[in-house]
Amino acid sequence: MLIPRESLRLRRTLTIIAGALSLSACHRAPPADTTPSTSPAAAHALLLDPANAEFTRPAPLVSRLRFETSKGVFVLELHRDWGPLGADRLYNLARLGYFTDTRFHRVRAAYIAQWGLHGDSAVNAAWRGRYLRDDPPRSRNTRGTFAFSYEGPGRESTRNTQIYVNLADNPKNDTEPFTVLGTVVEGMAVLDSLYSGYGEDAGSGVRQGKQGPLERGGNAYMDREFPKLDRIFRVVISLH
């Protein structure tokens, strides 16, 4: 049995240890998937600076991107070893809020759903031409797979910010060097239900030369000219 003086000394020691642990926790680095704690103005300024090192942070080996949309939730499982350059770009765009309040500008039923134009024309201008080098091709376009679009053929090193998901098996696209980065693991029915009535008229793909008005006009233009386009409210990242 401890005498009172020994008991007091032990309590003091435990208090010091607890305080040190608490201080260490306060200074511990945040998890890899957290978004920098910034004001809305600072977050917007970051989107205007594609050269910022935040956009080159390595993605986890596997992560899940939870898209909350006007039709419900879908989840992309992103595999870094399938294409490290593309995975890092997509992970950081999602992590830093690039896709917040954006539109699915190209939806063709039983073919693809595509997004990645920003709602602010200044952000679109900042990212124009911020191309990625190629990852090794992984071009098996089965239903539920996703990849960056690009401006080829013949211009393969032109991946930027636009992503497409295959809504069906699309073997005709397997001849092109797309790099599939993962699969939809939840919410394919949500993607199937996206409004597709505009077809190729609401901006189309990056190769058709129709996206200029969307890039320059942003959400105001899209909401005025194509009000039925479905929206991405935000993306939440989790590690798997």
Image (tube, helix red, strand yellow):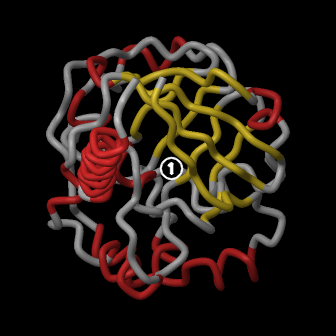
Q: Is residue 73 left or right of residue 31?
A: right
When the figure is inspected, residue 220 is found, relative to residue 55, above or below; the finding is below
> 31 or 73, which is in the foreground?
31
User: Image point 65% across, 51% down: which residue?
Assistant: 200
When the figure is inspected, residue 75 is found, relative to residue 176, above or below; the finding is below
User: Image point 37% across, 15% down: which residue?
Assistant: 175
Total marks in image: 1
User: Image point 57% across, 13% down: which residue?
Assistant: 142
Q: Quadrant of residue 143?
A: top right
Q: Quadrant of residue 220?
A: bottom right
Q: Position of residue 199 (x, y in %)?
A: 73, 49
User: Image point 27% across, 57% down: which residue?
Assistant: 23
Look at mark 1 in the image and give the residue it sits on. Answer: 205
> 133 or 30, which is in the foreground?
30
Quarter of the rendering occupied by the N terminus? top left
Residue 31 in view of the camera: no
Q: Is residue 212 left or right of residue 166?
A: left
**Mark 1 closeness class: few <14, some 14–19, many ≥20 residues within 10 Å:** many
**Residue type of the residue flagged with mark 1:** Gly
When the figure is inspected, residue 163 is found, relative to residue 111, above or below; the finding is below
